[in-house]
Amino acid sequence: MVILSSAQGYKVPEIARMYYLSEKYVRALIHRFNAEGVRSLNPRFNGPKIRGGGSRTFSEEEKAQIVELSLLRPKDLGYPFSRWSLDKLRLAILDRKIVDSISIEALRKILHSHNITIQRTRTWKESSDPNFKEKKERVRELVTNHAHHPEQGVVIALDEFGPLALRPELGANWAEMKKPDRVPATYSRGKGGQHLLAALDLTHDKLYGWTIPQKRWWRILAFLKYLKHKHPDTKLHVILDNHSTHKKEGVKTWAKGNDVELAYTPTNASWLNPIECHFVPIKELVLRNVYYQDKKEQTRAIRRYIFWRNGHKNDPRLRAMEKRNKVG
């Protein structure tokens, strides 16, 4: 390929960049071909040997510069792309003359040795709540002390999950090679959706769920009354977010008159709510890789999962999965 490229008029630097070779090695190949002809391309050629093996070594200073460049944004350096690929990073290294030659594999090894790998971008939220610290500390206190001070009442984390659409959902499961399960690509629209109103009793480690067609404050109130009915003689501490249905005057008035504390999470900080880590298993194990035909079928599946989860709450593998999805 080097000889053909040279015959087509490519210059040595262009050939070196094209095939990830050093210019010195390219020139040696061309000189040998000019001297010995086609027979020099035979692997068993006994002519002069060209040292092409052996890995190129880089100084610590060169490695440091390569790592530093890899952590910079290409756009900040004038390149027209949003992230580095190994090939684009290699070209930038050569353009800036950090080293005179480097292979893709050598570059990958240098980055790997400095714990630099491709990472998926993650989002973050900054709360603008003026009472962020006070609300956060109260939620943390309830979550931390619920197991050590049960005499102070039952702590419940509450939130809605959804909307849950009635459509085919892709997923993953064990199957024979190249014979995955299939779900239809088309489906009937107009079936509507629903929400899951869920609550986690942190004191007794029990999950509750109620599917509702829409978010309404009186449904929140009805769910709170149900939870209070489960613990009639105990103070309830309910952790919930700042959704308007949770802050209706009717909900607040009932809570004050029935020994129920409503502990609101700060604005844009719903990750503090422990119920959030239970929505991922429901999504992955109940809603993925399936096509529910109606709301009743979907509701039954969610209820079966909640019943199963409460019966296996002491399973260390289940606890590990829930802990892995916890972000608060």
Image (cartoon, rainbow, N blue to C red):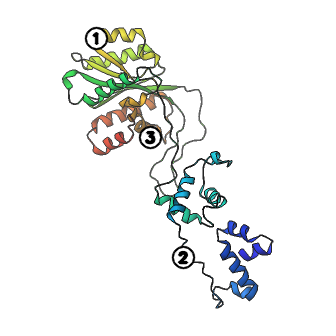
* Disc on the earlier residue, 2 or 3: 2
Mark 2 or 1: the one toward you: 2
Q: Say what amino acid the circle numbered 1 marks.
A: Asn
Q: Position of residue 2 (x, y in %)?
A: 71, 74
Quadrant where the C terminus sits is top left
- Vertical arrangement, residue 184 with respect to residue 273, above or below: below
Identify the residue position indicated by label 1 in the image: 258
State whether residue 73 appears in this view.
yes
Residue at 73%, 79% (x, y): give it: 30
Residues at circles 1 and 3 in contact by the CB criterion of under 8 Å = no
Residue at coordinates 63% horizontally, 66% vertically from top-left? Answer: 100
Residue assigned mark 2: 54
Instruction: Find numbered disc 1 in the image and state the secondary structure of the residue it sits on.
Output: loop
In whole angstroms, how far apart are the C-alphas of marks 2 and 1? 78 Å
Label 3 neighbour load within 10 Å: few <14, some 14-19, many 20+: few
Tell me the CA gap for discs 1 and 3: 37 Å
Which residue is found at the position 53% from the left and 56% from the top? 67
194 above or below 261? below
Provide the secondary structure element on which disc 3 rests: helix
Q: Position of residue 7 (x, y in %)?
A: 79, 75
Q: Which residue is disc 3 drawn over?
A: 284
